[in-house]
Amino acid sequence: MRNTVIATAVVLSTALAPTAGPATAATGAPGTRSDPSCGADNAAARTAGDPAPPASAPVGDAAETISYSLPAQLPIGMWSPSGLTLRTPAAKGTVRLDVTSSGFGTDSLAVQRYDTTTRKWVDLSTSPGRGSRPEHGAFTFPLTADASGARPYTVALRMQDLDRPGKVTVTASVDDGKGHTYRAPARTSTATRPEAAVTGWKPHAALRRGGPAGEFALTVRNTTDRAYPALRAAYFAYGEGKGHSLAPKDLILQQYVPGKGWQRLPLAAGGCDPGLSATLRPAAPGPLAPGAAAAYRLRLAVAASAPRDVRSAEAGVSVSNGEQSFFSQQLPFTLQNAK
């Protein structure tokens, strides 16, 4: 009914995330933002300095001229460490990472190297896949290293998938500036994310003004091999009539907290349009460990004073890791008058 609420959901990623379809991966791709000022930009997280430098131990086999490492999984929305070790001199050389993906385009990959001088992560120069070949791309950066088998030179790298599950294969090479190109064995990783599901919400839910609440549950299970830090879940809604829009006082959102019972969650109005959002209370202490699950019990009611000209609402839940959304599901409902 209105796309703006979806865009607003994206930019409020710490309080909510986008939705499209019954259940989808939520992305931070360009074009989803309704207004650059309406939320935190993920680019800040991609260029910020780190408090501690990454590990710089050599990777690969000591007999290899060049080695490249990549973990078996790339949890979506999280930086995954990788590295490149050179064991031969490279005078004004160039490192090139040729990337082939399946399930998503290479333009959704972010790759960075750690600059030991500035102590910051720096984006690599990129030629992402486009047109008929979105699954092929290349990332490059300059390198000068007086390396040898006895004195290997290692560059810390990291990679992040911002889109959806799939696979990525990386072949690293170095042009040493003297007419020689050295290639490392290709490495393949699986882009994955925790599984999330909503139960209890009816496809054509109808809530009466001043009537009983509709109850539902959101469950997130970490099916990856990494702990997901800063797991955040959110609820969002948008409803508009001929003269009014839903306001925070018009919806009563509650979450069940063990030992405390049902607790009301404050809904906040969006800064860019009349959309509403609420951050759910943490359902798991600390990072969500591999194999662990977080369950959120919720219920929603419509206040008796909700405007009569608003007859339906777009709504849903979303889950993010604090920086990047990885799940959302629509939970629309109609508003009915009290009997």
Image (spheres, rainbow, N blue to C red):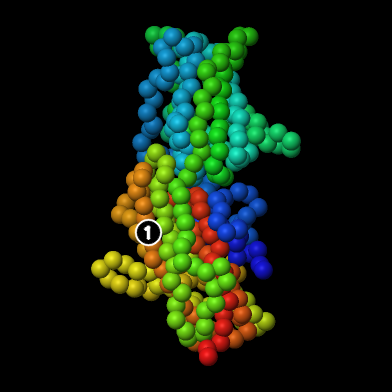
**Can residue 331 be seen by looking at this rendering?**
yes
**Nearer to the camera, 167 or 185:** 167
Q: Identify the residue at image location x=37%, y=59%.
A: 295
Residue 173: image x %, image y %? 57, 19
Placement of 157 over or under 312, stated as above or below:
above
Single out the residue that lies furthest toward the right: 132
Q: Identify the residue at image location x=60%, y=35%.
A: 102
Residue 323: image x %, image y %? 47, 50
Label 1 Cα neighbours within 10 Å, binned few <14 / some 14-19 / many ≥20: some
Residue 48: image x %, image y %? 46, 42
Q: Identify the residue at image location x=43%, y=18%.
A: 60
The residue type indicated by label 1 comes to Ala
143 to the left or right of 150: right
Placement of 172 over or under 9, stated as above or below:
above
Residue 78: image x %, image y %? 46, 42
Q: Secondary structure at mark 1?
A: strand
- Mark 1 sits on what residue? 295
**Can residue 122 be seen by looking at this rendering?**
no
Single out the residue that lies furthest toward the left: 259
